[in-house]
Amino acid sequence: MVLETLTVRKEGSVLFADIAAPPMNLLGPELVRDLVALIKDAEGDDAVQVLVFASADPDYFISHVDLNRVSEYRAEAAKLTGEASIALLFHHLSASRLVTIAQIEGRVRSAGSEFALACDMRFAARESAILSQFEPAFGLLPGGGAAQHLTRLMGRARALEVMLSGEDYDAELAERYGWINRAVPADRLGTFVKSLAHRIAGFPALGHIAVKDRVNEIALAPAEDFRRDSDLFGEAVRTPEVQSRIRAAMKRGLQTRDGEMAMGRILTDTTDD
């Protein structure tokens, strides 16, 4: 595979993929294209059992979608699922036979958070990880599955708090709420995840599949629910009010590396002057 935005290495039955999409790991068409290629390749290789996602950028895991290229990244997602929806791409990842782990350092917001939620497990650096679902600040429902995952993981009240506030949550609070499995000291995170990935890969693949299938029957929302959320996001993001708020946020630093280091300032006022 020739991948522009992912650096991949294989260790036995574990595949490690580092996300490298400068300047801030936006989920744009290039990254979606490479994720589709990687997932297809890994699913087609019976020797691969565990897939670990990390970031080459310590400040950003996946920031969020590229709001200037919505139709383009959706078209890339369709190459795996047949439908122009990253929600269904993420649902596919959750339902895959592969065991997937997100190793999170830095900021992971909106669709970045939804990608991490689609992974089977999430471990985050205690000192640096920041999680957020800020779509409602623009008048949007999260379109990649956050409403489905967070409500099941956190319960109704906390899921509403997270989404309606658009606040940044540090790793310790995210752990307490159930957003992530564990907050791990940054200097131990890579070693911890690597050890866990190899331990899981050392057990029979049939066990992975059986457990995932049963757990998903209990805890993973049907694809139709993800499709509905994706459609609602796609319809709303094109409306004049939402586009006006996005333009205002762009002026304040949205989708710039430095601006999004302090997202709260950008979200304070998303009205277009």
Image: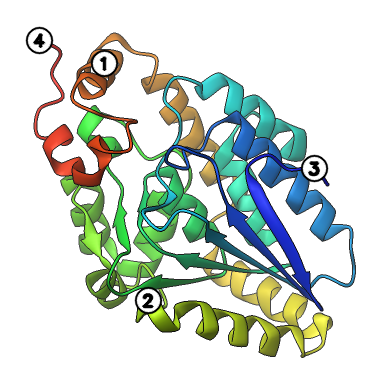
Model colouring: rainbow
- The kind of residue tagged 1 is Arg
Which mark sits nearer the N-terminus, 3 or 4?
3
Residue 102 vs 226, above or below: the answer is: below
Could you tell me residue 36's position as x and y percent?
A: 72, 43
Identify the residue at horizontal 41%, vertical 25% (top origin). 67
Mark drawn on residue 273: 4
At label 4, which amino acid type do we have? Asp
Displayed quadrant of residue 250: top left
Disc 3 versus disc 4: nearer the observer: 3
Q: Is residue 97 visible?
A: no
Decide which of tag 1 and tag 4 comes sooner along the chain. Answer: 1
Circle 4 packing at 10 Å, graded few (<14), some (14-19), many (20+), is few
Residue 186 - label? 2
57 or 163, which is in the foreground?
57
User: Residue 89's spot in the image, x, y percent?
Assistant: 64, 44
- Give residue 187's quadrant in the image: bottom left
Residues marked 4 and 2 touching at CB (< 8 Å): no
Secondary structure at numbered mark 1: helix
Q: CA distance from mark 1 to mark 3?
A: 34 Å
The label on residue 220 is none
Q: Provide the residue designation for mark 1.
A: 247
Tell whether 256 sits left or right of 245: right
- The residue that label 3 is drawn on is 2
Q: Which residue is at 47% across, 59% downward? A: 117
